[in-house]
């Protein structure tokens, strides 16, 4: 019998999936695609600071995990659209809630950092 998934177990494959979903670029891709489908170049503009290479790798990883659909249209010039699967939508909603919470808590985090750094210097 196979053990049930448990992210606290070092060998659990769910850790890898969790890493894909919560990585910097994975989280931002999922969050962006919550609104609508995007072409590669649109998505790159939407997510500031991501390189073409990292975006391509992230999209491929999330597609492989079943979170994204890649729809390549046979036209010239080629057109590829990315959208969320049902599972991808669920994941996107979860990580967006976390990202939104971080945005709301940012002033408290900044204050905590300043307090921590001030105490360390003294």
Image (cartoon, grey):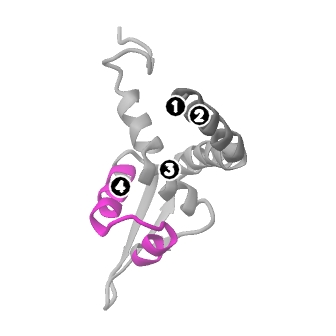
Is 94 on the left-hand or right-hand side of 85?
A: right
Crowd around label 1: few <14 · some 14–19 · many ≥20 (10 Å): few
Residue at image location 55% in from the left, 28% down from the top: 122
Secondary structure found at label 4: helix
Cβ atoms under marks 2 and 4 closer than 8 Å: no
Q: Nearer the viewer, mark 3 or mark 2?
A: 2
How many angstroms separate mark 3 from mark 1 (CA)? 35 Å
Secondary structure found at label 2: helix
Q: In this view, does 48 lie above or below 120?
A: below
Outermost bottom residue: 76
Q: Quadrant of residue 78?
A: bottom left
Residue 37 visible, this angle? yes
Q: Is residue 47 above or below residue 87?
A: below
Please provide percent x and percent y for residue 2: 35, 12
Please provide percent x and percent y for residue 11: 30, 18
Q: Which mark is residue 29?
A: none
How many angstroms separate mark 2 from mark 4 (CA)? 38 Å
Q: Residue 121 carries which label?
A: 1
Cβ atoms under marks 3 and 1 closer than 8 Å: no
Q: Name the residue under label 2.
A: 118
Residue at image location 31% in from the left, 63% down from the top: 56
How many angstroms separate mark 3 from mark 2 (CA)? 32 Å
Crowd around label 2: few <14 · some 14–19 · many ≥20 (10 Å): few
How many angstroms separate mark 1 from mark 4 (CA)? 40 Å
Crowd around label 4: few <14 · some 14–19 · many ≥20 (10 Å): many
Residue 101 visible, this angle? no
Q: In this view, does 67 lie above or below 33?
A: above
């Amino acid at each position: 019998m196979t053990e049930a998934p448990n992210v606290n177990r070092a060998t659990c494959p769910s850790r890898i999936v969790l890493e894909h979903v919560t990585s910097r670029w994975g989280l931002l891709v999922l969050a962006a695609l919550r609104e609508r489908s995007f072409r590669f170049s649109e998505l790159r503009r939407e997510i500031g600071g991501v390189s073409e290479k990292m975006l391509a790798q992230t999209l491929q990883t999330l597609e492989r995990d079943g979170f994204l659909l890649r729809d390549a249209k046979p036209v010239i010039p080629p057109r590829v659209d990315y959208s969320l699967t049902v599972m991808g939508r669920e994941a996107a909603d979860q990580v967006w809630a976390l990202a939104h919470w971080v945005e709301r808590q940012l002033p408290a985090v900044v204050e905590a950092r300043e307090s921590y750094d001030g105490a360390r210097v003294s």
